[in-house]
Amino acid sequence: MHKNIEPSILYFGTPVVLVTTLNEDGSPNVAPMSSAWWLGWNCMLGFGARSKTPQNLVRQKECVLNLPSETMVSAVNGLARLTASDPVPPHKLAMGYRHEKNKFAIAGLTPVPSDLVNAPRIRECPVQLEAVLEQSHPFGHNPHRPPTALGLEVRVIRAHIDESILLEGYENRIDPDLWRPLMMSFCHFYGLGERLQDSTLAEIPESAYRPAAHMGLATANQFQ
């Protein structure tokens, strides 16, 4: 039997992303989030409209999407209720957030220079995706009040992948049996279990999914 309910959130399970941007003074900011999905080399990010990271991203037009592995759960959790906003917005203050300037140090993470954007990558993350802002969309629009969220479409322009998760025998593929992303479901952390069974979609060569815009730009550090 199914029952009609009204959950406060619909976080059925998505990967955690540590988004790095630059603050107004040029200092690095890192924010954990999990409202992200990919289509080709584009990614849609969902943020609260008053959060610091979307403000930085809209201003700088660039960021890095760092994907932590499940072994990094403690570092990610250490960032959970920190914000670069000063003063702390009232709604976040009510939820126990506090202002923190150097979130990298608090989480024990290491910033490293990116190749094509100014925002730093996170050394400890096995997947680091440099990206630029394509479009910004108001989300959760209500005619009687400003939008409470933003949908930010970014385009990945360079992918840095730890060699330990690459598929043996292929230059540009990630081994899904080696990649253990940190997941969030209803605000709790999870990892992936073992593969349940082979998918018929996996019988299609992965290169068939490469966006046409990237066909002439493939390099050793990009997906196939």
Image: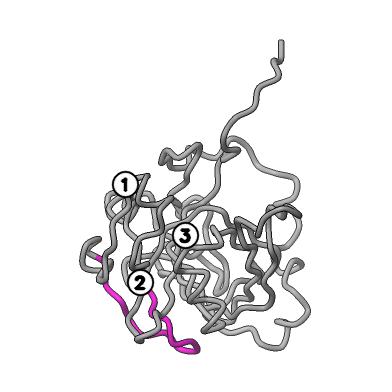
Residue 21 percent location from the top left of the image: 43, 76
Residue at x-position 45% and y-position 71%:
128
State the count of labels.
Answer: 3
Q: Which residue is mark 3?
A: 17
Amino acid under disc 2: Ile
Q: Quadrant of the C terminus?
A: bottom right
Residue 8 located left or right of residue 160:
right
Q: CA distance from mark 3 to mark 1?
A: 21 Å
Q: Which mark is residue 122?
A: 2
Q: Identify the main secondary structure in magenta.
A: loop
Q: Is residue 33 above or below residue 188?
A: below
- Secondary structure, mark 2, is strand
Closer to the camera in the image, 217 or 205: 217
- Secondary structure, mark 1, is loop
First of labels 3, 1 by sequence position: 3
Amino acid under disc 1: Gly
Residue 186 percent location from the top left of the image: 50, 36
Range drawn in magenta: 109-121
Q: Is residue 73 above or below residue 22?
A: above
Crowd rating for badge 3 (residues with CA inside 10 Å; few <14, some 14–19, many 20+)? many
Residue at x-position 64% and y-position 76%:
155
Q: Which residue is mark 1?
A: 96
- Select label 2 or label 1 by which is in front: 1
The answer to which image quadrant residue 45 occupies is bottom right
Q: CA distance from mark 2 to mark 1?
A: 26 Å
Amino acid under disc 3: Val
Closer to the camera in the image, 181 or 33: 33
Residue 212 located left or right of residue 35:
right
